[in-house]
Image: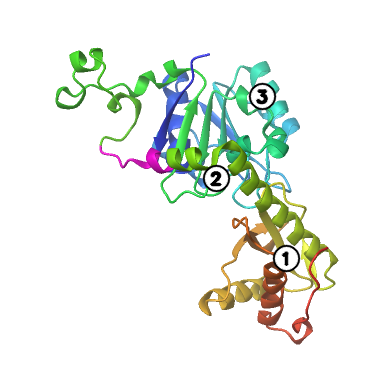
Amino acid sequence: AAPAALVTTGGTESNQLGLLLARERHGAVQTVCGSGAHHSVRRAAWLLGLPEPLALPTAHGGLDPAALDDALTRLPGPHLVVATAGTTDTGRIDPLPEIADLCARHRAELHIDAAYGGALLFAGRHRALLDGLDRAHSITLDLHKLGWQPIAAGLFAVADRDRLAPLSLTADYLNAEDDTAAGLPDLLGRSLRTTRRPDILKIAVTLGALGRDGLAELIGRTLDAAQRFAGLIERHPRLELWERPQLSTVLFRPTGAGDEQIAAVRRTLLTEGRAVLGRTRADGRLWLKATLLNPYTTPGDLGQLIELVEGSTPDDRYAPRRIPPAP
């Protein structure tokens, strides 16, 4: 009924705010998250003098409701649960409704890091993936991926504006009480920063120019390209797919290749200026990570990327071969 939001430098600052406000509300909260949670969660706990976050291990890095229920039952509180809507490594979205139910039952704070996946709010046919997001006490958003904004484009949102009260600060030369009462904007009391860039302007221009429908189309095209790429990998006899993507991150690797070969492929493509692929670990192995963000990626582009990976694998078994585009 009384939400509020503020612009941040990105997901790291927003997650730090989530932990800070939980600490100010409840004291030394014990943070619980999945093993695939963003590294900024652990760093924020260290910076704020909070206990080391408990990262619950799963094969996919997400937050498992059964493991969360057990942790909240046995660990002394107060608790702050950090769920993720789009992990950095795999793009997975945690089961938000079940997690919200558990937080309500155990009276735990819920912060959702939706820096990657939060833009699905604009995409009608994909929006259901974010069911449960509205039950969070605070949310991290960042539009520099699926919002196509230059950095910085972070947002931090709270369900109740009173939660921002600990940030309140008065400096007479910036936000004197009588000026604030007269209606002059007072942003100093709503952020950790003083000087700031007008980052909200580019976000407002984008929203005004494209609207929800325009953003929904771009997001849909991007996620469709990721599914198309996953299909090409699944049908390829010499490539292995980690799993079908929920967002636009696709993990894959040449079948039978070792971790050293995988790392060498990535470095070769990078240093030759041919392709920029990420890398991550899943199920104890190293995987190439393609995070697709161009809504105009074509099947031909995807086939070419596969050819580049094959041609850069330092093993005769991986000679380049042309793969027909997906129908």
For mark 2, give the secondary structure: loop
Amino acid, disc 1: Pro
Q: Which residue is mark 3?
A: 100
Residue shown at 66%/24% (left/top)? Answer: 100
Q: Is residue 37 visible?
A: yes
Where is 175 relative to 152, above or below? Answer: above
Q: Which residue is mark 1?
A: 299
Amino acid, disc 3: Ala
* 321, 107: nearer the viewer: 321
Residue shown at 34%/30% (left/top)? Answer: 191
Q: Is residue 44 visible?
A: no
Position of the C terminus, as image quadrant, is bottom right
Q: Which residue is mark 2?
A: 38
Given this view, does label 1 or label 3 mark the residue nearer the observer? 1
Q: Where residue 43 appears, x then y in whole percent?
A: 45, 43
Where is 278 relative to 71, above or below? Answer: below
Tell me the CA gap for discs 2 and 3: 19 Å
User: Mark 3 packing: few (<14 Cα in 10 Å), some, or many (20+)?
Assistant: many
Identify the magenta region. 195-202
For mark 3, give the secondary structure: helix
- Is 219 displayed left or right of 141 in the figure? right
